[in-house]
Image: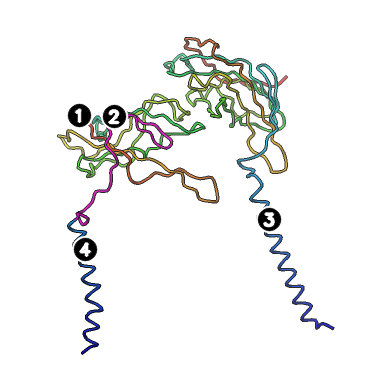
Amino acid sequence: MRSPSTTGSRWSRSGLLALLACLALVVAITAQTPDPSTDYRRRWADVGIGSWGEVENASVRVTSVRLTRSAVQSTYSDPLRTEVTFVVVTVEARVRQHQVYFDNLTLHTADDRDYEPRPDFIAAELAATPPGFTRAGTEVFEVPTARVPSAQLWFDADGAAFDVYALAVRVDLALDATTPVEPGPLQIEETTVRATP
Amino acid sequence: MTDVRGTVRLWLVPAVAVLLVVVLLGLSGGLRSGRGSQGRTAAAAEQLDLARWQLVVHSVELVPGEDYDPTLPPSLRVALRATFLGERSTYGFERGLVGVQGTGGGPLGTEEEPSVTSVRSDGFDPDVPQELELDFTWPKAPATPPAVVRVLVHDERLKDNYLFDADWVLQPTPVAHLDLPLTDQR
């Protein structure tokens, strides 16, 4: 017959081993799981120009795409010129339950480069929009001419948890080497917002 | 007596060895006060390929303070073309990439970090070049400035911190220097 102290010691040793096994499991899961703040998983919707796609709390679509080498935001400022290409994309967004900021909107090229909208035209971009409103905006990207064909507009998610897929939208901008480049300057209108009918 | 000789040998041999090393070091120039490496010699308009940037330095000018306030000190203006080589647009130019010195390697007395001027708003896109002016304020610029100044170009390296994403950090030693004629525009 074992003494109570021997039994207690065996139990505490088993408990310690179980704790170490749990910790090792946590370390293994942490090492294998993507960081939800940067490597979150997305459920991409691929759409074309004019079609709506769904992101978290909003429906979005591209309404037109134009190429130019010169663009101007207001009649009071000088046109901005480029030696590469401005890709001018007009977009529309209907916001539903919560305010949306549209901070993760990029032009993604076929060779995996991401271009953010030029801050020179910030007054034209999609901006924070409260629920129940529809915002129209224009995004201007400055891109090397060779990277324009096959470029897509990505409405990426702001973030996600490890156990859900974030909604994101890829829009094929239907650009190829024959897409005409307008001499410009293109007039870039400021963003507008209206109540969603 | 044997103990004394043994003790002397114990200290004398290492001392002579150390002295010999110091003498050899001195003879080979190792004790001269150093200015540190300033990288390879580059020329104006030469393309400098760095880890994340491509730079072409055009010129250096001494320009007066702003028109609206003549009391502001002059600045040493470095004109260059900068192209960001990363995979995603970045916010602004890394100001520590470029510095200025006298041609002898001594400080000029300018501020270390320049203000950056461009016809564009902040923001660099991958492989899209921008013309920039870096203004190093020079509070005690001499009435007769040096004919030539040295522009130092630093590179960056990716430093892993093992907890978060790796960061780009500036390397303290320049990778290149350019001795450029200084035009006084005051």
Q: Is residue B162 visible?
A: yes
Q: Earlier in the sequence, mark 1 or mark 4?
A: 4
Q: CA distance from mark 3 to mark 1?
A: 65 Å
Q: Tell me if mark 4 has few (under 14), some (14-19) or many (20+) residues whose alpha carbon lies within 10 angstroms of its own.
A: some
Which residue is situated farthest in the right direction here?
A: A1
The subunit letter for the residue under badge 1 reads: B
Residue under disc 1 on the same chain as residue under disc 4: yes
Q: Which residues are magenta?
A: B28-56
Task: Identify residue type, mark 2.
Answer: Glu
Q: Is residue A120 left or right of residue B102?
A: right
The subunit letter for the residue under badge 3 reads: A
- Residue at the disc numbered 4: B22
Q: Earlier in the sequence, mark 2 or mark 4?
A: 4
Q: CA distance from mark 3 to mark 4?
A: 56 Å
* Circle 2/circle 3 CB separation < 8 Å: no
Does dot 4 land on a helix, a strand or a loop? helix
Residue at 24% over, 83% down = B6
Task: Identify residue type, mark 1.
Answer: Asp
The subunit letter for the residue under badge 4 reads: B
Task: Identify residue type, mark 4.
Answer: Val
- Residue at the disc numbered 3: A26
* Circle 3/circle 4 CB separation < 8 Å: no
**Up-down: is B8 above or below B183?**
below
- Residue at the disc numbered 2: B66
The subunit letter for the residue under badge 2 reads: B
